[in-house]
């Protein structure tokens, strides 16, 4: 099953115009820290694009990193609930457990387009 970033290239709007409660921001900060790494963002983008679940070897090849590095980054994402993993025979297969993180990729694309457009 392939995850899809929203078709519009902008960050999704939040309902209402109120500030996000500080408790919510404190709750999501560890997940944001986990995601905020180039290799981990690449892993998420790969899983979004290619569909899931994917093995560690698929992910390491797509990201151009060694198996130990891929495994370490996958563990960090799994520990924060961003990814889920399941064993299939000798393989560990990873999927996106929190599809809302895909909005971060959409925001990155939008930000990059803004920079290229000079706005």
Image: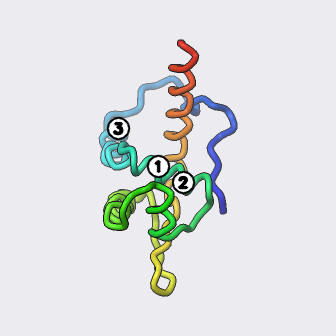
**Residue 1 percent location from the top left of the image:** 66, 63
Residue 78 appears in which quarter of the rendering?
Answer: bottom left
Q: Residue at x 32, y 34 (%)?
A: 22
Label 3 sits on a secondary structure element that is helix
Tag 3 residue: 25
Residue at image position (45%, 61%) is 83
Eye-nearest disc, 2 or 3:
2
Quarter of the image with the C terminus is: top right
Q: Is residue 3 left or right of residue 41?
A: right
Mark count: 3
Residue 48 point in image, percent of width and height? 58, 53
Estimate the spatial distance between the alpha carbons at disc 2 and disc 1, rounded to whole Å.
6 Å
Q: Nearer the viewer, residue 98 or 44?
A: 44
Front residue of this view, candidates 99 and 114 = 114
Q: Which of 72/28 is in front?
A: 72
The circle on residue 17 is none
Toward the right, the furthest residue is 7
Q: Position of residue 102 (x, y in %)?
A: 54, 46
- Where is 20 relative to 45, above or below? above
N-terminal-most mark, 1 or 3: 3
The answer to whether the residues at label 2 and label 1 have Cβ atoms under 8 Å apart is: yes
Q: Secondary structure at mark 1?
A: helix
Which residue is outermost to the top?
Answer: 119
Residue with the mark numbered 2? 46
Residue lying at the far bottom of the rendered structure: 89
Foreground mark, 1 or 3, reads 1
Q: CA distance from mark 1 to mark 3?
A: 24 Å
Callout 2 touching callout 3 (CB < 8 Å): no
| Mark 3 neighbour class, 10 Å CA radius: few under 14, some 14 to 19, many 20 or more | few
Q: Which mark is residue 42?
A: 1
Q: Secondary structure at mark 2?
A: helix
């Amino acid at each position: 099953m392939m995850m899809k970033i929203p078709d519009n290239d902008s960050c999704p709007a939040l309902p209402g115009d109120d500030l996000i409660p500080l408790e919510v921001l404190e709750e999501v900060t560890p997940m944001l820290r986990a995601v905020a790494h180039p290799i981990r963002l690449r892993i998420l983008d790969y899983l979004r694009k290619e569909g899931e679940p994917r093995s560690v070897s698929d992910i390491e090849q797509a990201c151009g990193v060694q198996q130990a590095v891929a495994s370490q980054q996958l563990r960090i994402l799994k520990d924060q609930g961003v990814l889920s993993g399941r064993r299939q025979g000798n393989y560990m297969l990873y999927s996106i457990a929190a599809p809302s993180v895909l909005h971060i990729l959409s925001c990155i694309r939008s930000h990059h387009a803004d920079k290229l457009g000079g706005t």
